Amino acid sequence: MAIGLLAAVPIQAQTNERYIEVTGTSELEIVPDEIHYVIEIREYFEEEFDGKSKPEEFRTKVPLPQIEQHLRKTLAEIGISQDAIRTQEVGDYWRKQGQDFLVAKTFDITLTDFNQIDEIIGNLDTRGINTMRIGVLKNKDILSYHKRGKIKALKAAQRKATYLVEALGKKLGDVIRIEEERSNIGFSLAQSNVLSSDAALFDQFRTIKKSYSMRVRFEISD
């Protein structure tokens, strides 16, 4: 009999527990202070740009070192140091059956200003440039932004729970549980080939966009 009474106590307490559980969210847009711009160069044939030759007539291949030299020269002229340029990968690409390999090379360029991207696009000869895109965006104070975003989400949950219980004539009690839900910590990236000097193309890719979500359970009191 004593064992049965002890088992019934927590069941009864759980049945009488009154709580509300809500999810609060927040979003932040962070201006990056480190921008990684990725450029892939690839060998090409001069005949591709003469406006009259057919693919089977392509003969004069422009070698990769020549294209790289032009790229580095252009970057230096607009004030980007060689230390900011990192080789990411090198590979061979089969162009067409019966023709030669075209070698490609990818560069990761560390920038501090989006205006530098506009300068690159405006000054670079696009022959030999296969793709250009924005890569990773970073901010040295990103952990502080994470903290701010989570606090905003937590307070949003508190406000939501407060007006819901007050609508029923009750009051919000103490916090029972806080659970951090999976947050969106991805970067806003430009993935497409970019060969235009129109700065508007980059507007939607110039910030780090993050969202946070917190699930909170509160007691309900009279």
Image (tube, helix red, strand yellow):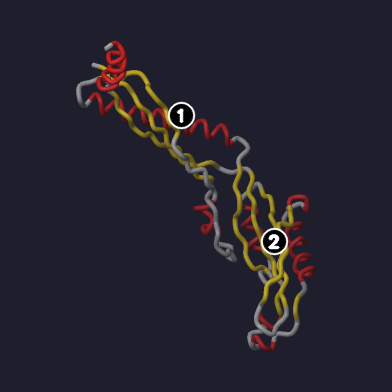
In what element is the residue under mark 2? strand
Q: Looking at the picture, which amino acid does disc 2 mark?
A: Thr
Q: Looking at the picture, which amino acid does disc 1 mark?
A: Ile
Circle 2 is placed at which residue position? 106
Corner quadrant of residue 25 = top left
The foreground one among 219 and 9 is 9
Rendered location of residue 51, percent (x, y): 63, 85
User: For the point 45% across and 38% down, which residue is it?
Assistant: 212
Rendered location of residue 200, percent (x, y): 51, 57
User: For the point 66% across and 61% down, which residue is it?
Assistant: 39
Q: Residues within 10 Å of mark 2 (few under 14, many from 20)?
A: many
Circle 1 is placed at which residue position? 151
Of callouts 2 and 1, the N-terminal one: 2
User: For the point 54% across and 48% down, which residue is it?
Assistant: 187
> Which quadrant of the rendered structure holds the C terminus?
top left
> Which quadrant of the rendered structure holds the N terminus?
top left
Rendered location of residue 170, percent (x, y): 23, 20
Corner quadrant of residue 69 = bottom right
Rendered location of residue 152, percent (x, y): 43, 31
Q: Which mark is residue 26?
A: none
Corner quadrant of residue 142 = top right
Q: Is residue 22 left or right of residue 138?
A: left
Q: Residues within 10 Å of mark 1 (few under 14, many from 20)?
A: some
